[in-house]
Image: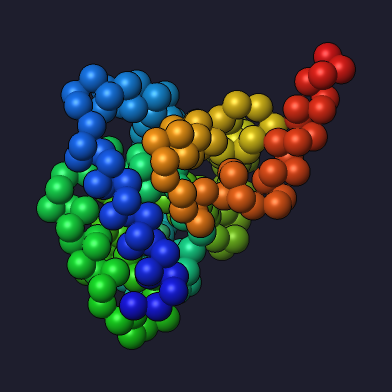
Amino acid sequence: MNPYQKEQSEAISMVWRHLIALDTAAIDGLKNMIADYLLFRNKVSEFLSEHFSALCNRKCYESKLSACCSREGIIIFFGDVVINLIESQDYEIMSILATLEQTNMGSKCIYLGNNGCIWRLKPIVCEMFLCKTAKQEVFNANPRLGEMWDEFKRWEKLYKWPDRPVLFDDLETYFIKAGFSSTLMYLHNNPGLLNVKRKSQILKKYE
Ligand code: SF4
């Protein structure tokens, strides 16, 4: 297990252990917290499947390029882990943990299985990635779709860009308060994101 896999495995195991111990009311509370985000993800998913899946299948999947998933270590937020685990069945979580035990022989993402990503709700960075070729082909043919995509990118920020209270920060805080810590808690440990938070808090004082 390389350091990336170890880091992922530790975060996933920790969140899973905590979720298993929660009662129904606490799980319902977490589900309420992520409900709006799931709505956003549904909308993005519908958009991508309507306008991109045929193209991505033809250009990438069938030719085995799969450029989106060809990086060994992608950025995964702690919030991605929490949300995916809330939405997953135990057997899916066990499959992810078992995969992380294996040596990644290729140059592809460890989570890329035979039928695509093994996460039920893939990380936000992956969902919002469109390669240059795909964007050019679709958006040049229909600029309105490009505008819609820009709108989705702005919407995405409302969950993870901490210039205001955001879900991904709240989920980290929830687990920190419960006594947990993870290197994937970027909204609490990434200098750039902490800076964004600090600036917005300073600006708020002068509003
Ligand atoms: S996590 Fe899933 S979607 Fe993201 S790069 Fe890996 S296999 Fe692809």
Q: Nearer the viewer, residue 28 or 143?
A: 28
Percent from the top left, x then y, of residue 191? 70, 52
For image coordinates 24% across by 62% down, the residue present is: 97
Quarter, ligand 1: bottom left
For image coordinates 32% across by 46% down, the residue present is: 15
Percent from the top left, x then y, of residue 37? 43, 30
Q: Nearer the viewer, residue 116 or 72?
A: 72
Q: Is residue 67 left or right of residue 196?
A: left
For image coordinates 36% across by 83% down, the residue present is: 106
> From the image, which quarter does the N terminus lie in?
bottom left
Q: Which corner quadrant of the image does residue 151 belong to?
A: top right
Where 186 sits versus 116, above or below? above
Residue 127 visible in the shown view? no
> From the image, which quarter does the C terminus lie in?
top right
Q: Is residue 171 left or right of residue 163?
A: left
Percent from the top left, x then y, of residue 84? 32, 44
Colour convention of the picture: rainbow
